[in-house]
Image (cartoon, rainbow, N blue to C red):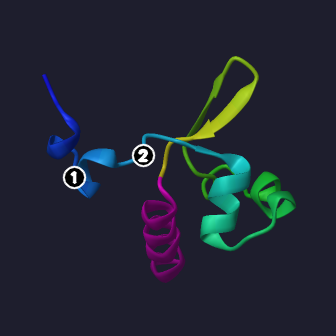
Amino acid sequence: MRNATDITPNSLDRAGWRIREWVRAVGIARSTYYALPADRAPSAVIVGGAHIVTESPAEWLQRVGKQRTAV
């Protein structure tokens, strides 16, 4: 069993973000998020009625940066 002293910053890695949180972290507008082409859109799922982005802002920025330099 884990107790409060076992919790470290790395053990609190997020599995998903609400769109509002994610776009704020990336620095784009929500409308820009919805206008992203499929190959540039972050991975996401719908749970109930909530859209949850499963790709971290840092991972997405890295991936999009690599796509841009590969073109």
Helix, strand or loop at disc 1? loop
Q: What separation in Å lies between label 2 and label 1 (alpha carbons)?
A: 13 Å
Q: Which residues are magenta?
A: 56-71
Residue displayed at 73% across by 70% down = 28
Q: Nearer the viewer, mark 2 or mark 1?
A: 1
In this rendering, position of residue 35 left or right of residue 59: right
Q: Quadrant of the N terminus?
A: top left
In x, y percent, where is residue 56? 47, 55
| Dot 2 or dot 1, earlier in sequence | 1
Q: Is residue 17 left or right of residue 1?
A: right
Residue 22 quadrant = bottom right
Q: Residue at x 70, y 48 (%)?
A: 19
Foreground pick, 39 / 8: 8
Secondary structure mostly seen in the magenta stretch? helix
Image quarter for residue 21?
A: bottom right
- Residue type highlighted by circle 1: Thr
Question: Answer yes or no: do the residues labelled 2 and 1 have beta carbons within 8 Å?
Answer: no
Q: Which residue is mark 2?
A: 14
x, y percentage for residue 9? 28, 56
Position above or below: 49 against 4? above
Q: Which residue is mark 1?
A: 8
**Which residue appears farthest toward the right when viewing the image?**
31
Location of residue 23 with respect to 13 vertically, above or below: below
